[in-house]
Image (spheres, grey):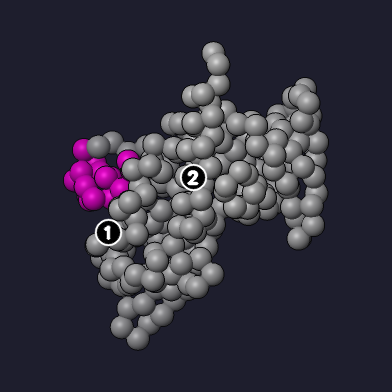
Amino acid sequence: MFASLNYSLAEASDGGVWERRRQVRYPCNFEVRCESGRKEYTARVLDVSPGGMRLRFPDRVETGWRFTVAGLPQADFLGGQRVSCRAAWLSNSELGVVFEETPTCFERFWQAMALNKRRELRVPARLPVSVLSGGRQLARGMAVNFSIGGVTLHTDVLLRPGQLVSLQLGPWGPLPELRLFARVRTVTPVMSGHGQQACGMCFQGRTMGDFRLLLQYFRRLQLEAELEPS
């Protein structure tokens, strides 16, 4: 999915897929229900954009296959909406999906989320974070920068790339506690007052409620950074 494609080839085959690939995408890790006629599948969302999704799908289907997608109660990122979709490509167990209608719950958030994607905009932070695993606290750390997609965490706990943990942020001022799964992307030795490892963390399995609260955290951190004396 991340392979480079020549625009003319993509345009000739399916311009819509090319547009989807150029859009900002967010990694995810939660299940959805897919239905077509009497067939029903449970698929896992791997990433999502304003134009579509990439799914881990349990069956082989034809390109152009039309179906509806609905969120499950534990992670209903569609806000109760059933969205009409079309299969754009299939590779091994992955299915590229194009939305045939824009999920209404996306319209208010995509612009803000796109601006705050980690590679485009981060804010400096000094935000205490608890690292949890299996319901127990492994360690505490300090988020030294923050985006909608993840954080850089200074901590003494020994984490490894690929490890999935839970991060607890807050409560912070008027903002309530936020607990999210995060996957360790990078680990770099550092010398700081908050730990000896700088861990690049990517948030996983976020709901729309999580996005709203993440955006509130981001805006408050951004305001604090703007108010700091230069």
Q: Main secondary structure of the magenta part?
A: helix
Residue plotted at (53% across, 42% down): 217
Q: Is residue 170 above or below residue 59?
A: above
Residue 153 percent across, percent down from the top left: 67, 36
Describe residue 46's horizontal placement relative to residue 67 as left or right.
Answer: right
The three-letter amino acid code for the residue at tag 1 is: Thr
Q: Is-magenta flag for residue 184?
A: no
Would you say residue 127 is visible in this rendering?
yes
Work out whether residue 88 or residue 185 is closer to the camera in this orientation and state it: 185
Structural distance between the alpha carbons of marks 1 and 2: 24 Å
Q: Residues within 10 Å of mark 2 (few under 14, many from 20)?
A: some
Q: Residues within 10 Å of mark 1 (few under 14, many from 20)?
A: some
Q: Is residue 16 above or below residue 79?
A: above
Q: Residue furthest left?
A: 12
- Residue 167 tag number: none
Describe residue 118's horizontal placement relative to residue 129 as left or right.
Answer: left
Boundaries of the magenta span: 8-23
Residue plotted at (44% across, 37% down): 116
Work out whether residue 92 or residue 40 is closer to the camera in this orientation and state it: 40
Residue beneath label 1, please?
102
Residue 16 percent across, percent down from the top left: 23, 50
Would you say residue 203 is visible in this rendering?
no
Residue plotted at (60% across, 38% down): 151
Describe residue 73's horizontal placement relative to residue 128 as left or right.
Answer: left
Residue 80 percent across, percent down from the top left: 38, 71
Please name which of the two marks, 1 or 2, marks the residue nearer to the observer: 2
Determine the image quadrant of residue 142: top right
The three-letter amino acid code for the residue at tag 2 is: Gln
Residue plotted at (38% across, 82% down): 39
